[in-house]
Image (cartoon, rainbow, N blue to C red):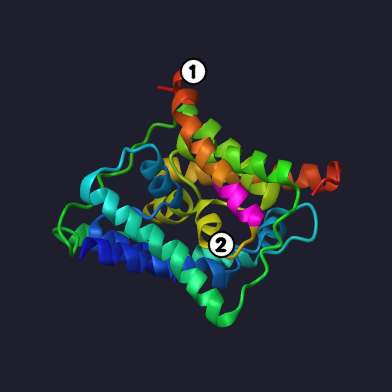
Amino acid sequence: MRVALAFAAGSLFGLGLVISGMTDTSKVQGWLDILGAWDPTLAFVLAGAILPMALAWRLSRRWSGPIAGGAFPAAPKREIGRDLVLGALLFGAGWGLVGLCPGPALAALVWGGPMAVLFLAAMAAGMMMAIPARRHLRLA
Amino acid sequence: MIGTAGAILLLGTGRIMGASGILGSLIDGSARGTERLEKLGFLVGLIGMPALAVVIFGAPETNLTVNAGLVVLAGLLVGIGTRLGNGCTSGHGVCGISRLSLRAIVATVLFLCAGMATVGLLRHGLGVI
């Protein structure tokens, strides 16, 4: 049940990313290009995703627990650490560089050509480097 | 569709839909047992369903650069950045902002600004991308 729900969510997420244009790197870079020919359409995609999600968070506060059991996530942490700031800045730089973030990179893995596979391999390597980097930079 | 997917995952299983967290916790082994299976199920859908749709409807343009050096650098930055910052566009940008998490709002503003600065500098400053 839990795996089936996760599969359904992943499927819908993947289709949504492709249909909304998040896997089109020139569209993503066009959205980030506020100094040039700015294309604001992806802002509506983000807003359109936030709305049902905000509703889901409201519902989760009224429900005793998730449908398939377990518990809802704890309230979000509030402290803004150096890891959060540095991580977000590095991620944003990489995102702007070629126009791919993790969700669309996964959604385009099979049909995006060799560069999509290369990106995902590099991203996985970067994810593994995060643990030693945390220790090294004393980010806790 | 993206928001509905996040809603299904949250209301169905109690988990936050963050692509980098789901992939990252499988890669570094922090997801175990049924959590691991759930996350694998999510990834199979996320990778498999668009691939299936492409077979039926044809592949849309990704317009991804063919500069391998740029792709590797970007992948490394995205990988390390999303794990240090604990989230990406889906986790912070969609799921975090929609519950008004301060950390998610700060992270989203920062990664959007960094992305805009990168595109601005490399496209209009150096003319590389």
Point out which mark residue A108 bears. 2
Provide the residue designation for mark 1: A136
- Chain under numbered label 1: A
Q: Residues within 10 Å of mark 2 (few under 14, many from 20)?
A: many
Q: Is residue A30 magenta?
A: no
On residue B8, the disc is none
- Residue farthest front in this picture: A114
> Is residue B62 shown above or below B16?
below
Figure quadrant of the C terminus of chain A: top left
Residue A119 shown in magenta: yes
| Residue B111 image position (x, y, % from top left) | 58, 43
As drawn, is A63 to the left or to the right of B44?
A: left
Residue A135: image quadrant is top left
Residue visible at 53% across and 46% down in the picture? B108
Instruction: Give, as a three-letter code, the residue at label 2.
Output: Ala
Locate residue B66, reporting x and y percent.
Answer: 75, 53
Question: Does residue B37 appear left or right of residue A111 in this picture?
Answer: left
Helix, strand, or loop for circle 2?
A: loop
Q: At x 48% / y 52%, what residue is drawn? A: B93
Span of residues in magenta: A114-120
How would you classify the magenta stretch by its main secondary structure?
helix
Disc 1 crowd, CA 10 A, few/some/many (<14, 14-19, 20+): few
Residue drawn 66% across and 64% down? B62
Determine the CA span between mark 1 and mark 2.
Answer: 33 Å
* Residue type indicated by callout 1: His
Front residue of B61/B125: it is B61
Dividing the image into 4 quarters, which one contains the N terminus of chain A?
Answer: bottom left
Task: Using the image as rendered, state which of residue A89 and residue A1 is in the foreground.
Answer: A1
Q: Is residue B25 above or below residue B100?
A: above
Q: Earlier in the sequence, mark 1 or mark 2?
A: 2
Q: Find numbered disc 1 in the image and state the secondary structure of the residue it sits on.
A: helix
User: Where is residue B100 shown, x and y percent of the image?
Assistant: 40, 50
